[in-house]
Image (spheres, coloured by chain):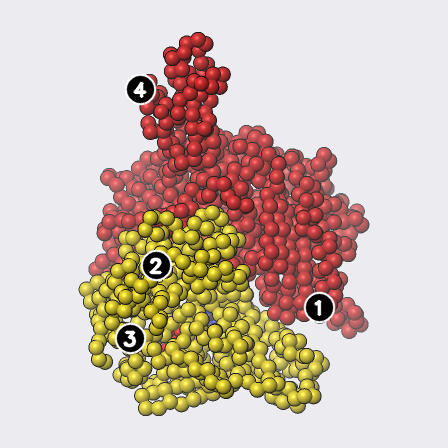
Chain colours: A red, B yellow
């Protein structure tokens, strides 16, 4: 499909003209900033001395926590994150000192001259150890419906197990970066790669001890973010601001790739336990889930992420009796953070493992078990937290996709292939996604916009959302143009700026277009009201009989006209100078908050989501069982985005999200050593998908004719949900592995399914199958 | 050295640019990436990793051919030292629009397919696409994938970029660069090709133009780092921030770039890029060809050399096991003489070789195979492409007509601190029939051969199992 409207920056991207923070031309006063971080996971700082470092000519500042003029705090929700370490360091990568110097080399030289004495303390580096020592970042969260204990007792079949899902590094192509330029007095201008400029502004004001109205944060675009710059973009910003404050010169901090990977948090790894009861048909009767995440050394967004994981542990399946417990472990690793899906993937991975296991244990196809357990259209349609699944598209998508992907015939082919081949196995799986759209912290569901029309008829849109590649600005440009009835190139979207639209929420939770689109529309509606009134007067002055009513004035095809008297019209651009003559304000702010949502976090009950996004994916893989090498043969996706605001952009989100999920499910493995050092700290050892890793046959469709009520132009959020479609790839690999023993034994499996996991799983299956066939030789338990 | 040149010249923005390192902030080891980014009008090129893994820094080099035409190759500018582009044309994303300000076909296609989201990877992709455009008309999917392997994109999932390649690379490489070629060629010809000697306060960078010079230089500067493609050595600068004091860059020595294909041996100069070598390997040395197919990325292979891969003597160097399997020899030369060392004897310890301090690797010699011998190569890595081997294998078997093993060589990478043969298993096989039962028996004794390590790439257990499984794989691929 050819996109009708390409990304608003596309021609700048392809010509290298798009300006990222590191590309900005700054005068020769610019200093390079560097953060010096802890080499120990847990240690007391006995003493430090940077007097030698300060003496180097060309080094302009070396700062410790003692030099912070305001509060030494940059925790976004809970104030438990020092900007610079104070008495202790609690993870490798924790910021300790800041350096500003004329060159990178001088920074490095200064860093080598800083002397620190530590007393090494015992670190906690695994979820298991944290649970053992009850090291948690807060009290466990709970949700419950029905009586799972009773129902489990009565269930004909019960399975129990545990699932480990790994961490994931964001690997945005542009590492964390911030440029601060001092203004007069206390003013500071901040150019930050942040998804949350308002929070960046707040935290800078806090560490500098100045008022928020002295701090302006601007974001033109980010070179990728994926949640990694929702809170952790703030860090480089606070550090650069402190150095700028101390030197009174522009300072830029851009993290080297390895430092970025070492310092910043990742997708939370989870260790989950499940106990699930089901009947002969595979219908789930009861489930008890325990989700344990590794929050790292500070809270960050870990509780909201755990909450979303708990809210998605059902995925698309109705579970009548259920309890969910969520614990966020405190460990000595960098604080983990938002990552596309925000706990959803970790929750859904459990749900999908359970359904897959039920199918294997009953000897049935997992597609059948999935469909049997889908939320119903009229009955069995209330989630475990009390929200009714409205506009349920699961069956619609399932029917279309199973047909278009030719699932059942391909299942036969896969089985035939597996029967013939010993060293290669194929696997096939379908998995659904049902993803709740809204921030679960209800008040965050608000947005603002500022729309200016200029006398030449051009329009400048400011809104609170940030552009990280997802095409938000393009969509906002389209919304403003469509609402004003003008051609697209009349509208420009400004860099996001806290002095234009204040007090915004992060661009996150896939809600950027939903929230900001409505705010833009609101501003445009206000302006149109004012313009319509003035234009009605103008028309009436020319033709008093009958007068033009302002309600009849419409905006279309770059014109403003009276729909009752279409001959009364004026070009949009011609009307604007008249507005100024008639003293009509051509600037308006818009505002939006999501209606009808709200929920009780304590009880775990209510309506957290405005609506659900749905999608489904069929994946087929080929696995080399001797080496664990796997190839994605074919992927079919059908995804629901309502009436798409921009099909080209939305397809890009679906494809890109899926592939990012494939990375999480297959090759992206994060390892630490027993001291808490990140071993996979560069792309040399941390492997995100390359062009060779995408499905050989990759078919992606958007569900047609499914307008979404009560959203901007009947669209749906798209950014996060597709990531979880990749669970089908993971389960297809598991399906291929279990084919080694004719699906008779449940494989040991974790996520990601690296070649190592695959080969070890196959070895284990082979051993267990020998034991199973000859029980008398099995070692006594 | 005669006719010394103390500055570096290349063509950028259709002009000859000369950089002299004495009075500037530049050093001889300033990378082309950092050089470009220091200019106000070349900030399109991006740094994503500074280690050759992401391709955000991709630029294209135009190189004058003997017939007066130009050859265009994509390279990672983050791993290239500025003097390495002496005498070449440096093409960046800013150069691609034509005089009328219109986008190049590859740029236009990327706009139309929605090939960019955040756009940070895009300039690098554009340059890889541009190189593809110049080199392949109507490329196949494999060719497209291969040309884009060295570029990571975290946003798009690659599908639209593949489509952009397929729809735009259809004009036989014609564009303003083709029209401008004679003019650029004459600019390039005007740049003298003598040896370079670049001296700054801290560094001495020598770039001899002749082998004899190179050989005398290494005698004079025994402490110097020898570089050819620098894809290994550059990491010391870009990742470890080392300041290399003395460098001898042999990438300008034409004598090392020769390939000689004789009826019974193929000899590849140590300075031949892996990309150039591949052409002569496909028919006679398919297992080596296959290995190079999954070696790094096109950007890496366009500069990396055999000399460099052997020079590192890395236990995970991918060419070593296969070269051992092919009974290859390394040619070592000093000013006085030339000797051949069999690959088996070349690596003597962890990153140690039989090369003497005054010698250079000048070529690799591959004897052509007789009938009945089979060589296969295997690379087990987390990601199929652009990844370093977890385990690699180069295996050779000679069977007699009764399918009995006469000779077998099982060389492994990643299993010890050097490339290492499974000698006991080899011994076990000789004289036995090439049958599954025998192979499975051999797998029983395999575990005693190696004690690999656990590291960021994989655990020791996996390494052992995968290495052992490769025997079965080899067997299954060699039975008739
Ligand atoms: C992104 C990336 C991917 C890579 N992928 C792979 C891979 O898949 N497989 C693999 O095996 N390697 C890989 N490498 C490592 C490296 O590219 C190879 O080892 C390459 O062959 C080195 O060649 P070079 O010419 O660039 O070496 P250089 O960096 O120039 O030199 C490497 C070493 O060899 C010595 N040397 C070079 N030439 C000579 C000579 N003629 N005589 C004596 N000594 C010499 C140098 O002194 C130095 O010690 C990769 C590297 C990067 C950055
Ligand atoms: S910056 Fe990543 S390859 Fe050069
Ligand atoms: S478009 Fe963002 S990394 Fe490729």
Vertical placement of residue A745 versus A327, above or below: below
Quadrant of the snapshot with the C terminus of chain B: bottom right
For the residues marked 4 and 2, what is the alpha-carbon distance in whole angstroms?
A: 55 Å
Image disc number at residue A770 = none
Q: Are marks 4 and 2 on the same chain?
A: no
For the residues marked 1 and 3, what is the alpha-carbon distance in whole angstroms?
A: 55 Å
* Numbered disc in front, either 1 or 4: 4
| Secondary element at tag 1 | loop
* Numbered disc in front, either 2 or 3: 2
* Numbered disc in front, either 1 or 2: 2
Q: Which residue is mark 2?
A: B179
Examine the rendering and report whether any part of residue A269 can be seen: no
Q: Quadrant of residue B363?
A: bottom left
- Chain of the residue where label 2 is placed in the rendered structure: B
- Chain of the residue where label 3 is placed in the rendered structure: B
* Numbered disc in front, either 4 or 2: 2
Crowd tier of the residue under label 4, counting other residues whose Cα lies within 10 Å: few below 14, some 14–19, many 20 or above:
few
Picture coordinates of residue B5, whole percent (x, y): 22, 73
Q: Which residue is mark 1?
A: A421
In the image, is B293 to the left or to the right of A574? Answer: right
Quadrant of the snapshot with the N terminus of chain B: bottom left
- Chain of the residue where label 4 is placed in the rendered structure: A
Q: Which residue is mark 3?
A: B207
Crowd tier of the residue under label 2, counting other residues whose Cα lies within 10 Å: few below 14, some 14–19, many 20 or above:
few
Residue closer to the observer: B434 or A442? B434
The residue that appears at 38% across and 31% down in the rendered structure is A459
For the residues marked 1 and 4, what is the alpha-carbon distance in whole angstroms?
A: 81 Å
- Chain of the residue where label 1 is placed in the rendered structure: A
Q: Are marks 1 and 2 on the same chain?
A: no
Residue closer to the observer: B227 or A309? B227
Comes first in the chain, label 2 or label 3: 2
In the image, is A309 to the left or to the right of A580? Answer: right
């Amino acid at each position: 499909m050819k996109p009708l409207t390409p990304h608003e920056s596309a021609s700048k991207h392809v010509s290298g003209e798009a300006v990222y923070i590191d590309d900005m031309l700054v005068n020769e006063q610019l200093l390079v900033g560097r953060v010096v971080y802890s080499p120990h996971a847990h240690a007391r700082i006995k003493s430090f001395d940077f007097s030698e470092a300060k003496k180097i000519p060309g080094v302009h500042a070396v700062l410790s926590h003692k030099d912070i003029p305001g509060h030494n705090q940059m925790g976004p929700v809970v104030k438990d994150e020092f900007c610079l370490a104070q008495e202790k360091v609690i993870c490798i990568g924790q910021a300790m000192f800041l350096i500003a110097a004329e060159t990178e080399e001088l920074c490095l030289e200064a860093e080598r001259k800083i002397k620190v004495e530590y007393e090494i303390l015992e670190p906690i580096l695994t979820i298991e150890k944290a649970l053992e020592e009850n090291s948690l970042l807060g009290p466990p969260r709970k949700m419950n419906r029905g009586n799972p204990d009773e129902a489990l007792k009565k269930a004909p079949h019960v399975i129990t197990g545990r699932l480990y899902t790994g961490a994931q590094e964001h690997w945005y192509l542009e590492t964390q970066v911030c440029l601060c330029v001092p203004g007069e007095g206390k003013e500071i201008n901040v150019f930050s790669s942040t998804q949350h400029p308002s929070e960046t502004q707040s935290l800078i004001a806090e560490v500098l001890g100045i008022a928020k109205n002295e701090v302006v944060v601007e974001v033109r675009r980010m070179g990728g973010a994926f949640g990694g710059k929702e809170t952790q973009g703030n860090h480089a910003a606070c550090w650069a601001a402190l150095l700028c404050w101390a030197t009174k010169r522009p300072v830029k901090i851009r993290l080297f790739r390895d430092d970025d990977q070492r310092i910043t948090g990742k997708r939370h790894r989870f260790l989950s336990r499940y106990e699930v009861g089901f009947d002969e048909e595979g219908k789930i009767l009861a489930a008890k889930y325990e989700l344990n995440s590794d929050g790292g050394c500070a809270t960050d967004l870990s509780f909201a992420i755990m909450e979303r994981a708990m809210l998605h542990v059902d995925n698309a399946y109705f579970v009548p009796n259920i309890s969910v417990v969520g614990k966020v472990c405190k460990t000595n690793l960098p604080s983990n953070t938002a990552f596309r899906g925000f706990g959803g993937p970790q929750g859904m991975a459990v749900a999908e493992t359970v359904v897959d296991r039920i199918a294997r244990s009953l000897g049935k196809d997992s597609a059948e078990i999935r469909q049997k357990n889908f939320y119903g259209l009229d009955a069995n349609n209330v989630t475990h937290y009390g929200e009714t699944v409205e506009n349920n598209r699961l069956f619609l998508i399932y029917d279309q996709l199973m047909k278009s992907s030719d699932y059942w015939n391909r299942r036969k082919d896969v089985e035939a292939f597996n029967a013939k081949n010993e060293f290669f196995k194929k696997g096939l799986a379908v998995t659904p996604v049902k993803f709740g759209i809204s921030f679960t912290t209800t008040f965050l569901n608000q947005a603002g916009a500022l729309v200016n029309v200029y006398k030449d008829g051009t329009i400048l849109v400011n809104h609170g959302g940030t552009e990280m590649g997802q095409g938000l600005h393009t969509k906002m440009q389209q919304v403003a143009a469509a609402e004003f009835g003008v051609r697209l190139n009349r509208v420009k979207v400004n860099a996001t700026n806290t002095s234009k639209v204040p007090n915004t929420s992060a661009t996150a939770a896939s809600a950027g277009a939903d929230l900001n689109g409505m705010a833009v529309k609101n501003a445009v509606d206000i302006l149109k009201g004012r313009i319509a009134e003035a234009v009605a007067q103008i028309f009436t002055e020319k033709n008093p009989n009958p007068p033009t009513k302002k309600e009849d004035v419409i905006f279309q095809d770059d014109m403003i006209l009276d729909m009752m008297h279409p001959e009364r019209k004026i070009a949009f651009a011609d009307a604007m100078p008249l507005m100024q003559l008639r003293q009509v304000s051509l600037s308006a702010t818009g505002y939006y908050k999501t209606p009808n949502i709200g929920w009780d976090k304590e009880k775990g009950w209510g309506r957290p989501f405005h609506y659900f996004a749905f999608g489904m994916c069929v994946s087929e893989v080929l696995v080399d069982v001797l080496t664990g090498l796997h190839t994605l043969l074919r992927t079919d996706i059908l995804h629901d985005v309502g009436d798409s605001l921009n099909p080209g952009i939305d397809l890009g989100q679906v494809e890109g999200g899926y592939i990012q999920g494939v990375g999480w499910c297959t090759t992206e493995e994060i390892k630490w050593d027993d001291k808490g050092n990140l071993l996979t700290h560069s792309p040399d050892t941390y492997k995100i998908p390359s062009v060779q890793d995408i499905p050989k046959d990759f078919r992606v469709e958007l569900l047609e004719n499914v307008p979404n009520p009560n959203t901007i132009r009947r669209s749906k959020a798209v950014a996060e949900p597709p990531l979880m479609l990749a669970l089908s790839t993971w389960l297809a690999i598991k399906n291929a592995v279990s084919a080694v023993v004719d699906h008779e034994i449940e494989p040991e499996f974790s996520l990601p399914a690296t070649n190592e996991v695959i080969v070890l799983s196959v070895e284990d299956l082979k051993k267990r199958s020998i034991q199973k066939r000859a029980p008398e030789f099995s070692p006594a338990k | 050295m005669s006719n010394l040149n103390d500055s570096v010249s290349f063509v950028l923005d259709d002009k000859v640019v000369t950089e002299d390192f004495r009075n500037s902030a530049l050093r001889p080891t300033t990378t082309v990436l950092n050089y470009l980014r220091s200019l106000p009008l070349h900030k399109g090129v991006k740094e994503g990793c500074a280690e050759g893994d992401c391709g955000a820094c991709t630029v294209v080099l135009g190189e004058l051919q003997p017939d007066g035409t130009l050859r265009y190759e994509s390279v990672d500018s983050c791993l290239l030292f500025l003097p390495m582009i002496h005498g070449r044309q440096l093409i960046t994303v800013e150069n691609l629009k034509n005089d009328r300000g219109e986008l190049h076909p590859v740029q236009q296609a990327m706009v139309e397919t929605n090939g960019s989201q955040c756009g940070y990877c895009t300039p690098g992709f554009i340059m890889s696409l541009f190189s593809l455009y110049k080199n392949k008309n109507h490329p196949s999917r494999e060719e497209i994938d291969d040309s884009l392997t060295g570029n990571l994109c975290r946003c798009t999932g690659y599908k639209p970029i593949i489509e952009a390649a397929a729809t735009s690379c259809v004009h036989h490489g014609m564009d303003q660069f083709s029209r401008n070629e004679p003019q650029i060629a004459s600019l390039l010809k005007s740049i003298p090709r003598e040896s370079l000697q670049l001296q700054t306060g801290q560094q001495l960078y020598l770039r001899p133009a002749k082998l004899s010079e190179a050989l005398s230089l290494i005698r004079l500067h025994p402490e110097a780092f020898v570089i050819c493609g620098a894809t290994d050595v550059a990491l010391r600068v870009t990742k470890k921030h080392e300041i290399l004091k003395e460098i001898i860059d042999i990438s300008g020595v034409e004598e090392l770039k020769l390939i000689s294909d004789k009826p019974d041996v193929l000899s590849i100069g140590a300075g031949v890029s892996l990309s150039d070598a591949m052409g002569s390997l496909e028919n006679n040395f398919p297992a080596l060809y296959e290995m190079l197919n999954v070696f790094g990325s096109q950007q890496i292979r366009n500069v990396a050399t055999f000399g460099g891969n052997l020079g590192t003597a890395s236990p995970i160097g991918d060419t070593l096991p296969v070269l051992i399997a092919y009974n290859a020899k390394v040619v070592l030369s000093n000013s006085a003489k030339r000797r051949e060392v069999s690959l088996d004897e070349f690596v003597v310890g962890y990153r140690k070789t039989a090369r003497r301090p005054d010698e250079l690797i000048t070529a690799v010699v591959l004897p052509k195979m007789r009938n009945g011998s089979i060589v296969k190569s295997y690379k087990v890595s987390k990601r199929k492409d652009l990844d370093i081997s977890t385990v690699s294998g180069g295996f050779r078997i000679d069977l007699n007509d009764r399918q009995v093993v006469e000779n077998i060589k099982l060389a492994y990478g990643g299993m010890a601190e050097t490339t290492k043969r499974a000698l006991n298993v080899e011994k076990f096989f000789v004289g036995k029939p090439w049958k599954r039962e025998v192979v499975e028996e051999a797998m029983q004794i395999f575990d005693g051969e190696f004690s690999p390590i656990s590291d960021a790439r994989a655990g020791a257990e996996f390494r052992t199992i995968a290495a052992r499984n490769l025997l079965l794989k080899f067997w299954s691929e060699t039975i008739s």
